[in-house]
Image: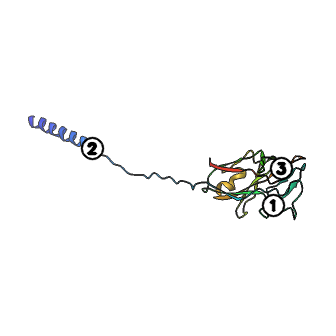
Amino acid sequence: MKKTIQFLMALVIVMGFATGVMAQQTDNDVITARAEVSAQVNVTQVSDLIFGMATPGVTKTISTEGVVLAGLAGTAPNITPNGGVEQAGKFSVAKGLNTSVNLAFTLPSSLSDAASHNLPINFNDAGVNKLAKLSTFGGTQSDLSFTPGTGITTANTGTTAAYFTDDAFYVMIGGTVVPASDQFSGVYTGPITLTATYN
């Protein structure tokens, strides 16, 4: 009986030891944290918005195609100092593939000459013609028109989906100058800024 008790006690100790060993058993594995950072968004000036000759008292509108929608079209000798006649303004935007960017213009309300005279300018829709648009480099996607003052966001659904997946495109802008009937003659200029921000 004594041997049986000793045997049972030894068995309990061995089992307790085995249980303790099993309780301390561990295991692990590793996964990798991965992130891909998009390319920096980059906006580059391609060409200026040029109205050509504007006549006092005659409103002149240039479309995103550089076409005169209102006012008089420039013809020789009405050549602007840089050698052009009329043209839309153009920026290029480069960004990461499959990314959303907000595009917003900072627009002047007037242009100024060297003597600080002002020439009113606006970027309101000209009838059915919106005065800004997106266009792909190769023209592989449809142009997308919008109102300059409201800006636009490239989203992964809807009308901007092609520009969401693209990594570069153009942004064109037109505008309207409104010379007074007694507008001083001269060359008037003002800055148009396009800002692209990841959304």
Nearest the viewer among 115 and 9 is 115
Tag 2: amino acid: Met
Relative placement, left or right, of 73 versus 30 is right
Q: Going 18% across and 41% down the picture, which residue do you hit?
A: 14
Residue type indicated by callout 1: Thr
Render colour scheme: rainbow
Distance in Å between CA atoms under marks 1 and 3: 15 Å
**Vertical side of 142 occupied by 7: above or below:** above
User: Label 2 vs label 1: CA separation?
Assistant: 88 Å
Where residue 22 is drawn, which disc sits there?
2
Closer mark to the observer between disc 1 and disc 3: 1
| Residue situated in front as seen by the camera: 12 or 84 | 84
Say which of marks 2 and 3 sits in front: 3
Q: Which residue is mark 3?
A: 177
Other residues around mark 1 within 10 Å, as few (<14) / some (14–19) / many (≥20) = some
Q: Badge 2: few (under 14), some or many (20 or more) residues near its Cα, within 10 Å?
A: few
Q: Please tell me whether mark 2 or mark 1 is closer to you in this view.
A: 1
- Disc 3 residue type? Val
| Helix, strand or loop status at disc 3 | strand
Reading the image, the residue beneath label 1 is: 80
Horizontal placement of 197 versus 19: left or right? right
Q: Is residue 154 visible?
A: no
